[in-house]
Image: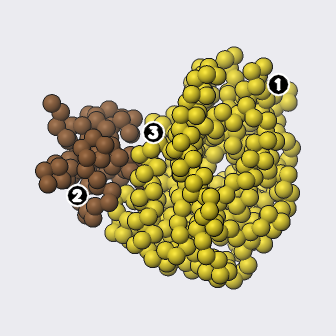
Amino acid sequence: MNQRGKSYLTGLDWMIHAMSGSARRSGGKRISSQIVLELDGLLDEQRFKDAVERFASGFPMLNGRASRNWMLEPYWKNPPKSKSVGIRVEVHRPAKEEIFQTLETCVNTPFGHACEYVVFHLLYPSDRSCLLAMAFDHRLLDARGAEQFMLLFCKYQSGAIVLDEIDCIPNVQRASLVAQWKKGLGGSGCIMRTVHKNVIGSNMIRLGGESELVGKKGGFIHLHLNLEDSQALRDRASKEAGYLMFMPYALATACSAFGALASRRNKIGSFIIPCTADLRDRDRSWKQTFFNYCSLFFFKVDSGIANDRAKLIFSLKEQFFKQTKEGFPQHLADFLSLMRYVPIRVFEWMNSKNHASFSFASVGESLLEHQMVFNLKINNLYHFPLIPPHVGVGFFFTQFSGRINMGVSFREGVLSDEEIEIVREALLEF
Amino acid sequence: MKTIQMELLERVADVLSVEVAAIDVEAPLHSLGLDSLRMVEMLVFIETRYGVDLMASELQPEDISSVSALARTVGLKKGE
């Protein structure tokens, strides 16, 4: 239960805060992403802005910030009503061939002030359709949460939901310090085996040096498969990885693409890959809209098998099974809850030692399937994913209305133009 | 004593946070809302509970794609 209505931050939230600090101090902006909805029709600009203003007034946390109580536990502090400024809406009218560039610019644009975490962008490239993008800071919303927030807005706008009748404040229990330490350290053996032993002596391959990752904006590769190609990919995944094994197959696809880059740079060693694991309850409670619920799996792949599809898939499935059986993602989440007591700058320093070749996430069916936006159909929904600090490259797979969308995010300069094409081809070939 | 199918049905219901009665045992698991992570959680449960490793085995989708198919396959493997 929240004490006096406070939203206490979890260890997973604190990890994001540390990553955000690292990103800012290395010359970048905060840890942020963007979801994009391609709409079948035109959104009325003023109607949209009015709806956003009304909706945002119900969420003072939109302009909050992290603070600590007297026991050093971090929580999200809401601003006084007078300081709540809601959600900004920016409007763009790009030419059709400039849509992607404009979306890249939107996600690369810093937020307006320290307590702004969500910005809407309306793009009108034609007089028949438009795009709705929402840039968001991961300290307030993770990728799934951003979709859930968008869903909440759409349902509110259509009258399906009354904000006063739902509870979006997360339940973060304040356990005793002893209980937290027991729980947090209980899985430390699992964490040591899965992460530290895998990394030490692994000759991990990284593409970008620290200096190459400083101060550069984000670059993105997007591949939107049509229905036929998406189904063909799912069929291959089912045949080669097994029933409902799309995630390991998609991860193998990303490994293959990264392997092509490593090979081009004559790098031999291991890929260490943190892979997102959403720990949300399946009942999709509105209480799990805000803040972070994604822990990690950690995969290790020898670069020598990056081109051997069968061995790659087998290895990934084996590790997936083992870490699920050991409860690694939950152990990591419990351990990170102890890091909340560590000064954020110290935690940032610890995080800067994070070892990974690239990050990976695969989201299944979108929460906005079958949802209308202001009575407009959504033709496609995809993400401009976050660029992991200190790692520099991330792969992100999503699905919408039967279509698979593949996204790659990278710090500009980490990949050359030729390498961008190599990644594109490797993803499509798999 | 619960049958394998009943135990698996209860486990799937728990994983999906729904009532047991809401699940059609013949429906494809992906249509019920299972994804890769939840499927692996089911396979971990099966290995722990019945000592049957379905993750590594070369099974066809129809052998594991519904609660009833899973139960049949587990039963067969247990008997081997």
Q: Say which chain is yellow.
A: A
Which amino acid type corresponds to the residue marked 2 in the rendered image? Asp
Q: Which residue is mark 1?
A: A80
* Residue A398 screen position, x and y as percent: 53, 59
- Decide which of A372, A119 is in the foreground and name it: A119
| Image mark 1: chain | A
* Residue A9 screen position, x and y as percent: 68, 32
The mark closer to the camera, 2 or 3, is 2
Question: In whole angstroms, how far apart are the C-alphas of marks 2 and 1?
Answer: 58 Å
| Image mark 2: chain | B
Secondary structure found at label 3: loop
Task: Categorize mark 2 by other alpha carbons within 10 Å: few (<14), some (14-19), many (20+).
Answer: some
Circle on res. A282? 3
Task: Categorize mark 1 by other alpha carbons within 10 Å: few (<14), some (14-19), many (20+).
Answer: few
The mark closer to the camera, 2 or 1, is 2
Image quadrant containing the C terminus of chain B: bottom left
The mark closer to the camera, 3 or 1, is 3
Q: Colour of chain B?
A: brown
Q: Earlier in the sequence, mark 3 or mark 1?
A: 1
Q: Residue at x 39, y 35 (%)?
A: B17
Q: In the displayed structure, does residue A370 sit left or right of residue A223?
A: left
Which amino acid type corresponds to the residue marked 1 in the rendered image? Pro
Q: Is residue A358 above or below residue A159?
A: below
Q: Residue at x 25, y 46 (%)?
A: B51
* Residue A73 screen position, x and y as percent: 72, 26
Secondary structure found at label 2: helix
